Image (tube, rainbow, N blue to C red):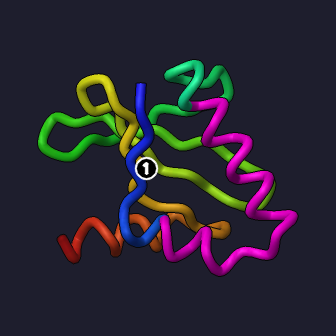
Amino acid sequence: MGIILSRDAQKFIAKLESKQAKQVALKIKELERLGHLNDSKKLKWSIENVDYYRVDIGEFRVIYRLEHKDIYILLLARGMMMKFISYLKGR
């Protein structure tokens, strides 16, 4: 299983302080190793019949979907989910 980071996720990680970036990296590696985490929550809605999941890392939210044999990390956000919703509306 591989991890694919969206451009937005890459930019977000690049702006993090080293301690926060390390926390995010550890969780993403765990996600890659296991394929799905027990503390992941399936979002209540899907887009074009694709299910999305959320995993929390402290104050951060990672939104991802399973895509064939890969995990596509769409967005990392601090706190509110509105960023994710506005991101999807802009696609």
Q: Residue at x 36, y 44 (%)?
A: 72
Q: Which residue is mark 1?
A: 73
| Figure disc tally | 1
Residue neighbourhood size for the residue with mark 1, other residues' Cα within 10 Å, grouped as few (<14), some (14–19), many (≥20): many
Which residue occupies 46% across, 38% down?
53
- What residue range appears in magenta? 10-31
- The quarter in which the N terminus is drawn is top left
| Mark 1 element type | strand
35 with respect to 67 (left or right):
right
> Which amino acid type is marked by label 1?
Ile
Name of the residue lying farthest toward the bottom: 15
Near-viewer residue (37 or 15): 15
Quarter assignment of residue 51: top left
Please say whether residue 27 is one of the residues in the magenta stretch: yes
Figure quadrant of residue 19:
bottom right
Magenta highlight on residue 24: yes
The x, y position of residue 29, in whole percent, is: 63, 36
Q: x%, y% of residue 4?
A: 38, 47
Judged from this view, the residue extending furthest toward the right is: 19
In the rendered image, the vertical position of residue 22 relative to residue 84, given as above or below: above
Instruction: Residue 77: name its quadrant.
Output: bottom right
24 left or right, relative to 73: right
